[in-house]
Amino acid sequence: MQNTLSTFQFVSLSVVVLAALFVPFLFKKAEEELELFLFLCGAAAVSIAGLWSGHLILEALKEPFLISAAVLVLGLLFKCFGGNLHRWLHQTEMKTGPKVFLFLLVLILALTSSLMTAIIAALIGAEVIKGLRLAEKQKVRLAVYLCFAIGLGAVLTPVGEPLSTIVIARLRAEPYQAGFFFLLQLLGLWILPGVLFFAALAASLGHGPLTDGQRATSADTNAAVLGRAGKVYLFVAALILLGEGLKPLAQRTIGQLSRGVLYWINTLSAVLDNATLASIEIQPTLAQNTLVFLLMSLVLAGGLLIPGNIPNIICASKLEIKSRDWAQAALPIGLVLMAVYFALLLLVY
């Protein structure tokens, strides 16, 4: 990888970042074809940075396979056997009531995502949300709350999501000797209030019956399930290219910044995979309080826009949520929560 960027490369990569952030909100066609647009942004970034290689192309082809395969297989299973799930959900709601039902849905999926992975949790959550008796705007809000919560919960173990895998790998040596439960011990007391907060927001949407238990099978066709898996494949490939292409810009920009500035710079993980930023920022030489600052900003910012993390991508694809609808629901609550966490972190550390 190049160690320095020319002025042209720096400016051009900055334009790519701005395009990835704002063009989907300004042009309807880019919003409708978000996966393709971000793929083109990623290809442009890699080209500008001069980082094309056989290894990168292979990675962009290989890495999305397992995620898209999981989307495809579970989509087909939900199509065939989803009726059993929805009948069980109906029985659960009858016992708990709609508010407790939504609270438990978000809480359980968020906390178990660190073991069954954020991908599986998001697939289950998206299937449940699709079958609920909620207005479309309420479904968008519920999906946003769920994905924020999953993003928080999945970071607690190295199997939950790529971010936590990378962090544990980086901190496995001295002085941290990070093991399986390191992130749970480091972040658990910060993560749990956030998960409970989003579960409570989800509960606020439960104003009437949500399930009827009558849905025998998914309304999706085989072509729709296959198309969704293809979109997820292209989306993940786009994020791999975007992350690699923008890495030199991130290294130059964030190299010597304070933890407070980095906290807000990490809002870039709304469009630039937070695992990429973690691979640049997280080092064994960092103090523990700085680690908390950086990691909390990365996981919180990941929910702000659809490209921010895999659960967002899966839920947005399954529920056909547009970029601007996601942003309208996610940005206000996400930025306020980031500000609250920032104040609390400054107070504690």
Image (cartoon, helix red, strand yellow):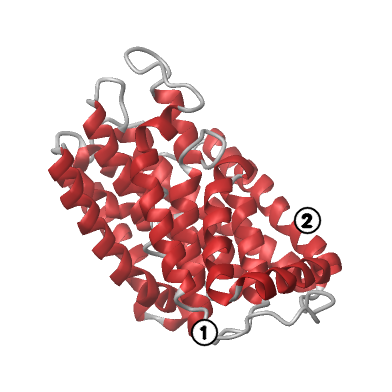
* Residue located beneath label 2 in the image: 73
The residue at the point 58 percent across, 76 percent down is 98
Look at the image and tell me whether residue 159 can be seen.
Answer: yes
Compared to residue 150, the image places residue 162 above or below, namely above
The residue at the point 66 percent across, 73 percent down is 93
Q: Quadrant of the N terminus?
A: top left
Compared to residue 141, the image places residue 55 above or below, namely above
The residue at the point 81 percent across, 69 percent down is 79
Q: Is 111 left, or right, of 233 in this rendering?
A: left
Which residue type carries mark 2? Val
Dot placed on the residue nearer the N-terminal end, 1 or 2: 2
* Residue located beneath label 1 in the image: 207
Q: Quadrant of the C terminus?
A: top left
Which residue type carries mark 1? His
Q: Nearer the viewer, residue 160 or 32?
A: 160
Count of numbered badges drawn on the protein: 2
Q: Nearer the viewer, mark 1 or mark 2?
A: 1
Please tell me whether mark 1 sits on a helix, a strand or a loop. loop
Q: Nearer the viewer, residue 197 or 28?
A: 197
Residue 312: image location, x then y, percent: 50, 61
